[in-house]
Amino acid sequence: KTIDDLGDLRGKRVLVRSDFNVPLDGTTITDDGRIRAALPTLKKLTGAGARVVVTAHLGRPKGEPDAKYSLAPVAGRLGELLGVPVHLAKDVVGDSARETVASLADGEVALLENIRFDARETSKVDDERASLATDLASLADAFVSDGFGVVHRKQASVYDVARVLPAAVGELVLKEVDSLKRATEEPARPYAVVLGGSKVSDKLGVIANLLTKADRLLIGGGMVFTFLAAQGHQVGKSLLEADQIDTVKGYLDDAEKNGVEIVLPTDIVAADSFAADSPHEVVAADAIPADKIGLDIGPASAELFASKIVDARTVVWNGPMGVFEFDAFAGGTRAVAQALVDATAQGAFSIVGGGDSAAAVRTLGFDEAGFSHISTGGGASLEFLEGKDLPGISVLES
Ligand code: 3PG
């Protein structure tokens, strides 16, 4: 069911689950991509005269109110982007939420406080989540699921509430699923996947799955040092997950068996310490000095990676190649982003997934229009690529 299938929404209260889990510096939002991505659904609903009640989480508070995780900055930014004030309730489903919703006029928007201030949201006990879902449902006549970044979570505002209210899929979730399907169902080949970010252990499932699907797997970021160690190289003080070395060796064997090309960096930007102004040098990937820490792939690797990306027909990228927040270590991430833009210009279908890579392309000044799709999902997009069941989506299909 889509929003159109919910019928005439004028005067109806519509609960929308969005993902507003944005990076904050104090109370300043440093990347509002997830808020902007929520606008099509919210505008469609306000345009239809609905009374919109948005629920979302921010960070991982411990199931009780915590001012540090208040959605107040989000309410402000959302109001600016929508061009109408967003009424922030002071609680999740309490008196303030009920009063705020009751005072909405047609086409107005309320935002409930961080749903994770209520411990029932993330409870593993079905009845506890169901009881929060009932409370949420009492505030609305219909539900629209639009928080793509959170559809992999079986939580009250994502999963359980969709079983209580008439539920529809939102514009963002539709767009994300359509795009990610192009990469998972019969991707145009060559199909290249670029993985980075700090931990191999976060990406085990997706790597195993890609070894049966992709033609090329390019590895950078902090996780690459576990790959280099698996090949028998010293990685100095670089990030290393020693307990994953055997798993990674298995991946390298599987890749060979399946004819999947694994592309690893040949050079590394190695620094004295993890700091923006640390002295650094380019070293061979198989000769990282014992007292150095690898913070980016080197220039030769950036060129190598770009050459493996530009002639691909489908490219998925998840995870920065280095510590792009520090200019001296942003070269690899910048080169990969540029290669995706070049590939896209030549007709490839490109997806940037994961909060960090999406933030990286914006921070580094790339035009979002240069990519076919920038996913708002981190874990969710990885689990989608992995082929896992996503509770927030399958509940809408049942
Ligand atoms: C994310 O940032 O990936 C989503 O908002 C999910 O957040 P979570 O990992 O805390 O559930």
Image (cartoon, rainbow, N blue to C red):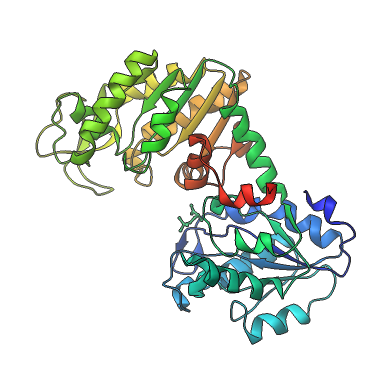
Q: Nearer the viewer, residue 46 or 2?
A: 2
Q: Residue at x 57, y 18 (%)?
A: 313
State whether residue 383 is above or below residue 127: above
Specify the farthest residue to the left: 290
Indicate left or right for 163 with 235 as reference.
right
Q: Position of residue 386 (x, y in %)?
A: 48, 35
Q: Is residue 89 above or below residue 241?
A: below
Query: Residue 289 occupies which quadrant of the picture?
Result: top left
Q: Is residue 230 above or below residue 45?
A: above
Q: Quadrant of residue 272?
A: top left
* Residue 374, position as x, y percentages in the image: 58, 39
Residue sitting farthest toward the bottom: 95
Between 256 and 234, the residue placed more toward the observer is: 256
200 sits left or right of 371 in the view: left
**Residue placed at 86% from the left, 64% from the top?**
49
The residue shown at (62%, 83%) is: 94
The reply to whether residue 240 is visible in this rendering is: no
In the rendered image, the vertical position of residue 167 relative to residue 239, given as above or below: below
Does residue 353 appear anywhere in the picture? Answer: yes
Q: Give percent across and percent down for residue 191.
A: 51, 20
Numbered disc total: 0
Q: Residue at x 56, y 29 (%)?
A: 184
x then y, percent, for residue 326: 34, 45
Would residue 208 be found to the left or right of residue 109 on screen? left
Q: Is residue 338 left or right of residue 138?
A: left
